Image (cartoon, rainbow, N blue to C red):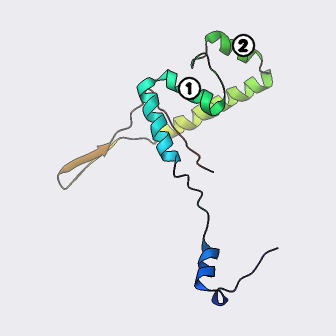
């Protein structure tokens, strides 16, 4: 049942207690992420393997799948699912072709300083997405 409180009938302490909210921020997560990133940068694959076991409970033989593993996995897929992947691939390609057309390098001069930006492809990228308590 919903309880209704009249703010003007509460003591200052009671009002403050009602207005307190538990924080969903995980204050330990950023430090843990820094530690993981630093260790992976120093130790590479061995650190990734250890963290996989620690957090996921799994043991990996390696981080790269062999071509035979891809072939075996593909053989298990239905034609309907393969068609869905092909269509998704085509949709993604079409969208990014459109997106790429709007990525135009720019230059200007402001107060004698030449400023601008240039779009350039990168070989690879990594992302670490921490969820905290979300």
Q: Residue at image x 64%, y 21%?
A: 59
* Residue receiving disc 1: 50
CB-based contact (under 8 Å), mark 2 and mark 1: no
For this orientation, the residue located farthest to the top is 68
- State left or right for residue 11 relative to residue 76: left
For this orientation, the residue located farthest to the bottom is 9
Q: Residue at image x 59%, y 46%?
A: 131
113 in relation to 54, above or below = below
For this orientation, the residue located farthest to the left is 112
Q: Residues within 10 Å of mark 1 (few under 14, many from 20)?
A: some
Looking at the image, tell me whether mark 2 or mark 1 is earlier in sequence order. 1
Res 23 → quadrant: bottom right
100 in relation to 28, above or below = above
Which tag is nearer the camera, tag 2 or tag 1?
1
| Residue nearer the viewer, 71 or 89 | 71
In three-dimensional space, the C-alpha distance between marks 2 and 1, rounded to whole angstroms, equals 26 Å
| Residue nearer the viewer, 9 or 45 | 9
Q: Residue at image x 58%, y 17%?
A: 62
Give percent across and percent down for residue 27. 52, 52
Give percent across and percent down for residue 26. 55, 52
Q: Secondary structure at mark 1?
A: helix
Asked whether the viewer can see residue 60, the reply is: yes
Q: Residues within 10 Å of mark 2 (few under 14, many from 20)?
A: few
- State left or right for residue 29 relative to residue 68: left
Give percent across and percent down for residue 123. 43, 26
Asked whether the viewer can see residue 101, the reply is: no
Q: Secondary structure at mark 2?
A: helix
* Residue receiving disc 2: 72
Q: Quadrant of the N terminus?
A: bottom right
Which label is found at residue 63? none
Res 14 → quadrant: bottom right
119 in relation to 107, above or below = above
């Amino acid at each position: 049942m919903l309880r209704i409180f009249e703010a003007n009938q509460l003591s200052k302490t009671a009002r403050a207690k009602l207005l307190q909210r538990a924080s969903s921020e995980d204050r330990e997560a950023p430090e843990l992420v820094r530690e993981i990133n630093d260790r992976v940068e120093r130790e590479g694959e061995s650190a990734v393997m250890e963290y996989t076991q620690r957090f996921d409970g799994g043991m990996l033989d390696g981080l790269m799948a062999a071509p035979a593993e891809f072939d075996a996995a593909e053989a298990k897929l239905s034609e309907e699912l393969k068609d869905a992947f092909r269509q998704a691939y085509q949709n993604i390609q079409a969208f990014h072709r459109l997106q790429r057309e709007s990525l135009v390098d720019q230059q200007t001069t402001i107060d004698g300083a030449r400023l601008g930006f240039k779009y350039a492809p990168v070989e690879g990228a990594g992302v670490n997405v921490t969820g905290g308590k979300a």
